[in-house]
Image: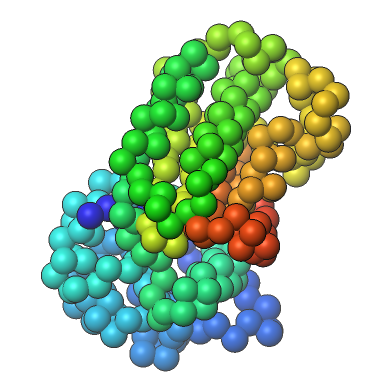
């Protein structure tokens, strides 16, 4: 059993910062170490992973089907699988403990509430049936990496052309990550204007991470580079290497994502990473798939001196 691990927002957890909720925000939020809102009155519970080592509150919240957001890191997967088995709960929403900026707490709450409503369930995020992950070290092996990512995934609840669409999205999105993101120490782009037929290699430790996650309802693609060079200003830049055959204000990869994805989330920690998350809602009929609502969410955490 695997956990659908979404790094939803920006760079790091800022302790003791006040929540910036609008007056209209009706969502009641509780942090495990704050006593201003009793847990039983909260709609959403945010918990640091360490709480499960000494408190029954986490188990109680899971069993009561509360909306629990657990702050975790990648070392916690085995422990979380054990917890899910012990509690009989198969839905959990996880956020990287280093990826939460509380300035965006209302965005998180809105996101998970909407997701919950769409699924008509009190829980948050389903455990995917299958997850494949790999690192891209060179543009030369992108095709093989995509082929391996697709292995073992069940697309029987999808229209016939979805695997091909996923392949096209991954091909362009990975090319963007390999060619558009890398910069040198001075912040100068290394390969941005290079022809896409050239072979470029990722700097060791800066390999692009890509994951494909599937369950009965959704197909989720995650592509993460470790440069964090995307900004509001260059979000829709049009690299000259593409020529003029596509829209001049949109990169080909983003064109495909906007056209064929339903939810598109970009999380940027400037100078650290950019993560693209594409959610495709499964449907056996292309007409139904194509008519579904689409949304775009862009979150950026600027570098700050603390």
Residue at image position (44%, 29%) is: 146
Answer whether residue 306 is visible to the viewer in this image: no
User: Which quadrant, please, contains the N terminus?
Assistant: bottom left
Q: Is residue 120 above or below residue 84?
A: below
Q: Residue furthest top?
A: 198
Q: Is residue 54 above or below residue 243?
A: below
The percent position of residue 171, horizontal first and vertical second, equals 56, 29
Q: Please give left or right for residue 276 compared with residue 85 in the image.
A: right
Answer whether residue 122 is visible to the viewer in this image: yes
The percent position of residue 113, horizontal first and vertical second, equals 52, 75
Residue at image position (52%, 78%) is: 117
Residue at image position (47%, 74%) is: 119
Residue at image position (44%, 62%) is: 217
Q: Quadrant of residue 274?
A: top right
Q: Quadrant of residue 87?
A: bottom left
The percent position of residue 172, horizontal first and vertical second, equals 61, 30
Q: Is 163 in front, or is 87?
A: 163
- Total numbered badges shown on the rendered structure: 0
The percent position of residue 134, horizontal first and vertical second, equals 37, 31
């Amino acid at each position: 059993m695997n956990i659908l691990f979404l790094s939803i927002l920006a760079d790091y957890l800022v302790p003791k910062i006040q929540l910036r909720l609008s007056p209209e925000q009706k969502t009641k939020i509780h942090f495990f170490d704050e006593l201003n809102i009793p847990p039983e009155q909260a709609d959403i519970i945010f918990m640091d992973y360490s709480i499960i080592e000494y408190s029954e509150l986490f188990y109680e919240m899971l069993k009561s089907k509360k909306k629990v957001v657990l702050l975790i890191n990648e070392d916690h997967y085995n422990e979380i699988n054990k917890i899910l088995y012990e509690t009989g709960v198969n839905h959990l929403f996880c956020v990287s403990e280093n990826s939460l900026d509380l300035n965006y707490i209302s965005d998180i709450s809105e996101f998970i509430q909407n997701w919950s409503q769409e699924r008509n369930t009190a829980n948050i995020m389903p455990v995917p049936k299958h997850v494949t992950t790999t690192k891209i070290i060179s543009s030369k092996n992108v095709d093989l990496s995509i082929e391996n990512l697709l292995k073992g995934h069940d697309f029987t609840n999808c229209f016939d052309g979805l695997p091909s669409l996923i392949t096209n999205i991954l091909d362009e999105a990975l090319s963007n990550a390999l060619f558009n993101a890398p910069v040198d120490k001075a912040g100068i782009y290394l390969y941005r204007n290079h022809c896409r037929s050239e072979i470029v290699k990722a700097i060791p430790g800066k390999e692009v991470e890509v994951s494909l996650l599937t369950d009965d309802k959704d197909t989720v693609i995650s592509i993460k580079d470790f440069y964090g060079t995307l900004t509001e200003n260059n979000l829709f830049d049009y690299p000259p290497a593409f020529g003029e055959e596509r829209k001049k204000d949109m990169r080909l990869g983003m064109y495909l994502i906007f056209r064929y994805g339903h939810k598109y989330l970009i999380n940027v920690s400037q100078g650290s990473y950019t993560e693209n998350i594409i959610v495709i809602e499964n449907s056996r009929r292309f007409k139904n798939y194509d008519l579904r609502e689409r949304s775009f969410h862009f979150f950026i955490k600027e570098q700050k001196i603390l």
